[in-house]
Amino acid sequence: MLPVIALVGRPNVGKSTLFNRLTHSRDALVADYPGLTRDRKYGQASYEQRQFIVVDTGGISGDEDGIDAAMAEQSLLAIDEAHVVLFLVDARAGLTPADVGIANHLRKQNKTAYLVVNKIDGIDGDSESADFYSLGFSHLMQIAAAHGRGVSQLLDSVLDPIKDAFPEMSVSAEPQDEEEDAEAKLARLQSLPIKLAIVGKPNVGKSTLTNRILGEERVVVYDMPGTTRDSIFIPMERDEREYILIDTAGVRKRKKVSDTVEKFSIVKTLQAIEESNVVLLVIDARQGITDQDLSLLGFVLNSGRSLVIAVNKWDGLDSDVKDDIKRELDRRLGFIDFARLHFISALHGTGVGHLFESVQEAYASATKRINTAMLTQIMEMAQDDHQPPLVSGRRVKMKYAHAGGYNPPVIVIHGNQLTALPESYKRYLMNYYRKALEVMGTPIKIEFREGA
Ligand code: GDP
Ligand code: GDP
């Protein structure tokens, strides 16, 4: 599990400025896709080989009379799900009653909270911060989010104490032997069941699908223990493969079918994506593609996980309605060239079998062994077919390629002036590799290294 850090504070203190600073630093795993909206409020961030999830809770109005009432449901849930809260205040505006209101609220939550005094650029931070000590927080940090000042000290203070509690947070530093490392990861992946996360916005049919899948199987269902904020892990077998379903909809937790649906939680969904090998993104055919679908999709693409898309509720639709929906999907999802799209009815079970064929294919693609000889040969073929462009009169030269990881497959290319390669050429290489390696259902990540 990754740690979740929530940004809390009244409007205008600099939450989104800090949020952007924290999340944009993350290398995009897959090249930026046009047509994707980035969800402003939830983001994955990384800092010095450590990964975490940031949530901009946004919704606190700071109205001291009705602080509880004024907090939007998702904001409250986000604070509840957070492991650490950063409470932002504005050094220039000074201490306001709204800050006091929020502080009182946070105190009741019993969370690790840091008081972050923002906008200390160009002013005397210590004297402007003095007032804020009265809020009674033991940790007080000064930053200028807009300029990045104090942000690394802040992250060190926040992340260091929790690093043992969240071993998954650490991404290993540049390994000595990447290929050997990748090989070890591959062996590990191949010995484990496929972790399949079923994600989607509320009411798309996740629970119906999960029940359908479980109902069709001879499953040994035992619920792994977890808290309310966790997804449930359900081991199962299908076509002689072992799986672990990551159930974000909380199917197994509901006592009766009629129990109210568990609250949708974006943080839980993000955690489930991180935990999984393959993501099954469920979309409701009757609602078309919404912004929320696109932002979930953005998270999946960022995570590098394999992806299969299920367009659910395909039953009982007229054929011209179906044609319209297909056109719409094509228009809005056409940019994802690697994921299979399935039209299913979770309610009737139609198409569910084929879904698993694609899940298997996606996992097989993500864990297909690749090696130096083969990657270098493909690279040379791509280079012969289409030379990289000249950069200030010199030709960019790719020398060799090797494997750098799996799930997603990582291809590391060494050569000269590679940083100058234009996006269009990178995309060309990506597509070339995809065709040559015959992978489907997984993104491919290409890293470029200068020199031999
Ligand atoms: P939010 O409403 O809490 O999300 O606040 P924003 O991030 O939108 O910031 C509100 C305003 O404060 C914007 O005009 C920012 O440019 C400005 N701001 C944010 N951080 C800083 C900072 O470190 N220094 C200064 N001087 N201004 C900042
Ligand atoms: P979740 O919130 O994503 O878990 O969605 P549910 O599984 O609870 O389904 C939401 C609603 O959509 C319920 O009323 C389901 O009966 C309905 N539903 C789910 N799958 C299908 C389907 O394939 N076809 C139709 N027509 N309705 C469905």
Image: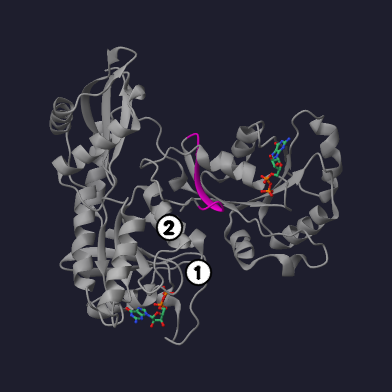
| Front-lying residue, 230 or 299 | 299
Q: Main secondary structure of the magenta part?
A: strand
Specify few, some or many for label 2: CA neighbours under 10 Å numbering under 14, 14-19, or 20 or more. Answer: some
Q: Earlier in the sequence, mark 1 or mark 2?
A: 1
Quadrant location of residue 77? bottom right
First to last magenta residue range: 39-48
Residue 294: mark = 2
Q: Is residue 399 above or below residue 147?
A: above
- Look at the image and name its color scheme: one colour
Q: Amino acid at mark 2?
A: Leu
| Front-lying residue, 5 or 393 | 393
Residue 25 % position (x, y): 50, 37
Image-quarter location of ligand 2: bottom left
Residue 149 % position (x, y): 66, 31
Q: Which residue is mark 1?
A: 264
* Residue at the (29%, 78%) spot, across then down: 212
| Front-lying residue, 320 or 173 | 320
Asked if the residue at label 2 sits under 8 Å from ligand 2, the reply is no
At mark 1, the secondary structure is loop
Numbered disc in front, either 1 or 2 = 2
Q: Amino acid at mark 1?
A: Phe
Q: Is residue 222 above or below residue 189?
A: below
Residue 435 % position (x, y): 16, 43
* Residue at the (43%, 71%) spot, across then down: 249
Residue 347 % position (x, y): 31, 81
Residue 45 included in the magenta stretch of the image: yes
